[in-house]
Structure formats: structure tokens, C-alpha cells
Amino acid sequence: MYLHEVVAQIPGIQTQGSLDVDIRGIAYDSRSVKKGDLFVAIKGEKSDGTRFVPQAIEKGAVAVASEAPMEPAPGTACIRVGDDRRFLAEISKAFFGNPSERLKLVAITGTNGKTTTSYLMESIYGGSEMRACLVGTIGMKIGSQSFHSEHTTPESSDLTGFFAQAADEGCTVGVLEVSSHSLSLKRVYGMRFRVGVFMNLTRDHLDFHKDMESYFRAKQILFSAENGNRVESAVINIDDPYGKRLAANVGCNLVSFGFNKEASIHVVDFHSRVDGTDLTLHTPAGEIRYQLKLIGRPNIYNVMAATGAALSLGIPLDQIQKGIEALTGVPGRVERVDAGQDFAVIVDYAHSPDALENLLNTVAQLPHGKLITVFGCGGDRDKTKRPIMGEIAAKMSDFVFATSDNPRSEDPLQILKEIENGMRGGPAPYVVQPDRRKAIEAAVSIANKGDVVVIAGKGHEDYQILGTQTIHFDDREIARELIRERLNH
């Protein structure tokens, strides 16, 4: 595709040099530039992409876009833009033929529940025999084929290219998790979403957003005209105070959900079991009864959200029921590790105060002996939540092992010291063990028949980031290995 063809679709840019060049791809990282690419120099928090323009040209970029003025190199077109991230989204949309118009996309945002809700939607699509794509924290999928992703919501050019591939391969529907970072950084700018889902908003990511009001405004972007997403139906949790605020201001069709009977989708009755939940919902299309394989109150919200999104797409109740009941679980979300032991081990991604509290509440409502919790907090992330999570763990557990999560560039002992500030008030006894494997081993070693060991924070992740080194580490693998060692002794 010729550069003049794509830039003609984007107003307000200035160009230098010949636009009569064939663009073969779009890159925002100079290391991934290929011959014939347009390189968009992004000004990030830690580095400025304009520094890498010479490397991009050397690797074969035929055009460069930047907010900063540039002198064109021989044979290279220069594009001056007002907003580099918005331009990246717009040029990707033009280059890939606007694939979000070819797919019925459901975008899910919120602090907790996005991944499980996206998997519920994927299961509903499968039950209705629609070919679907999925984008989220665990990765990306086209049908049954999986793809790796670095972020919950990939950069706009990667995401748009993925949706183009999905549409070309016969997908008609899709679901994606939309993080607050991605909304702030315009990764989904201008994409069309048939349904936007708001799950909840609780304390997280304040290292990036600084305060809860800014965090809320980032989530709100999905439903605002300024982001150009043209959400046709908003499915919003009105039990959440931020959700109630959002619902009062959306300018499209609203489907509310919650335990609150004012919600258009609300709980009539539910009964939790060790192996699932019986749930009856009132919906605008009639009452629906589920026999879920998922447990806990948070999953009831996830099911209500998925039900609302599916109804907004016109999927019949019987197909929604079939799809939701078919989902047996989600990797790293209240995932049981069973190696033949007489106590339960549950691995979960809970890495925020609200998520940890919900997880421990869910487990507390099941038949159990002692509740033994293993958790940590990530480095280079919101420090203010560390003592809060320590306090929650110490109040809701019978024994706590505080350990490392992904320390990244921070001192693991300093992170644990901040967690310990919240645990000191008890009442649960605790041990601080920076080695995560040793912490899991200690938890497994003290578990007796009927006890529950909860390993929180990493969930599906199969790595640990220690300084600049990334090592293989999977809580589920480690727990299974340590349980077998115990059983064989």
C-alpha cells in the first residue's frame, strides 16, 4: 500500500519527501523494523523513539513519523504528527483496512474479572458456533490457535494487525480485555466496539494513574466519544460506585447488572458449592438458570457481565446458557492443583487488595480447615497497596507466607518490609520468605487434611522477573511438584 493512500485518510499531519513509497508494515520499535516499514517514533515514559530513527532507517524504514520535527534522510519520507500514539492507531487502522468494522467486538474493562469474563464470552461464541478471536492477559487466540502477547491489550498496530488476521481467517466476533494503560496510551483509539463492558474499579495501578479519580477517567475513555470507539451497548456493574457514575453518563444503550434489583440483569437466587454455583438471573430476555462450574461471588458478576454482553449481540438465552455452563475454568483463576493430596491448593492471579479479599472470601465460604495464604506484591508497581494486602491476608487467613512476586528492579526485602507493615496487626501468624519456591514448600508442608493453601498473585504466569533476569516459574508446576515430593516421603 502506498504511503500517500494511507496518510490521505488522516487529517492534520505534515509531510516531507516523496509519499509515493510502498509501505509493507508499521513498526514502533526500531529493533523490529523490516525493509519497507513505516516507523512511528513514540515518545514513551522511559525513552524517546526519535533517538532510534537512524537505526530504523538503517534497517530499511522508508518513512518515519514523529511529533518532533525531523530533516528527511535521502529516500525517506517524514511525517510530522500532533499525537504519536493517536497517529499509530489511525495509520494502523488505515493500513489494515479497519478490521474492527468486520468483527463484532466486545471490549471489557475494569480492575478485576476481565479475563474470566472474556473466557465466558469465548465459550458463548463456541456454543453458538461463531468463529471468534480473543485478546487478553493470558494471550491471544484465533479459534483454537494461541498467540503470545506482551500486554493485556497490545499496542495499536499489533492489535489491529491481529484483528485483520482474525477477520481474514473467518472470525466474525471477538472479545478483548481493555486495560486502563491501553486506554490512556490510545492503543484502542478509533476501534469500533459493539459492546463495552465495565466490571468494577478498585485500587490498582496507582503507580501509573496516581489517584483513583485519574484511574476512573482512564476507564471512562472507552465509553467516551473522544476515543472514537462508537460503543453501541454499555454493560455496566451498577453495584460498583464508579460503575453507577459511569452508567449515569453513557450516551448509548445501557444494560446494567448487579445484585441490586434495579439492575436490568440481577441475581434472583444463587447457591455456592465446592465444585460450582447454582445461579438464577433475571434478564430483559427472561429468567435464566445456570449450573456453573465456577465458584464464588466474583464469578457471579463475571457471568452477569458475559450474559449482558451476549444479549447485546443478539445471542439467544439458550445459547448463552450452553456456552457459560461449558466453561470449566480459566488458567490461573481459582485454579485447583490436584496431585492426589487430601488438602486443597488454589492458584489465583489476585494481585490487588480487592482481588485478594474476594479470593479469600470465596475460599472462606467453602468447607475447609485452615486457610494458608502465600502471596507477594510486584516491584516497580503501586507501593501503597502492599501494606493493605498484608493486612487483608493477615485478617482473613489462618497462616500467611509473604514472599516475592515479580520484584523487578526493586529490592525484594524492601517490598516484603512494606507488606509486613500491614501484617503486624494480625491476627494470623506469618512468615516472611523471599524465595517463592520455599514459601510454597513451607505452605504445603504444614497443610493438613481439609486445609486450603491459596497461592496468589501470579496465576497463569510461568515466569518470575528478578532484577533484569526473567526465569521460568509457574506456581502450579511448583505446587504440584512439591505436593508429589511430600506424598512420596
Image (tube, rainbow, N blue to C red):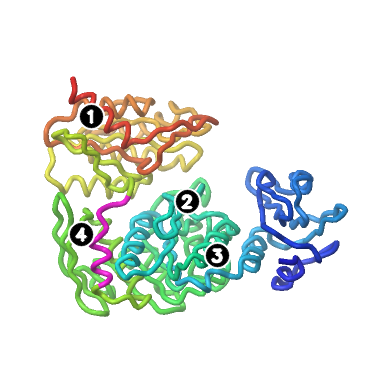
Q: Relative to residue 414, is residue 321 drawn left or right?
A: left
The foreground one among 337 and 309 is 337
Residue that numbered label 1 is attached to = 483
For label 1, the SS is helix
Indicate which label's residue lies in the foreground, 4 or 3. 3
- Kindly identify which numbered label has been placed on residue 164: 3
The foreground one among 424 and 416 is 416
For label 2, the SS is strand
Indicate which label's residue lies in the foreground, 2 or 1. 2
Q: Which badge, 4 or 1, is on the more N-terminal residue?
A: 4
Q: CA distance from mark 2 to mark 1?
A: 31 Å
Image height check: is 334 above or below 63? above
Q: Verify CB contact (< 8 Å) between mark 4 and mark 1.
A: no
Question: Which span of residues is magenta-colored?
Answer: 319-330
For label 3, the SS is helix
Residue that numbered label 2 is attached to = 147
Residue 35 is situated, as x and y percent measured from the top left of the image, at 73, 51
Q: Relative to residue 454, is residue 465 drawn left or right?
A: right
What quarter of the picture does the C terminus occupy?
top left
Q: Main secondary structure of the magenta part?
A: helix
Image height check: is 319 above or below 425? below
Q: Verify CB contact (< 8 Å) between mark 2 and mark 1.
A: no
Residue that numbered label 4 is attached to = 292
Residue 6 is situated, as x and y percent measured from the top left of the image, at 71, 69
Q: CA distance from mark 4 to mark 1?
A: 28 Å
Identity, as a three-letter code, of the amino acid under mark 2: Phe
Asked if residue 395 shows in the view, the reply is: no
Identity, as a three-letter code, of the amino acid under mark 4: Leu
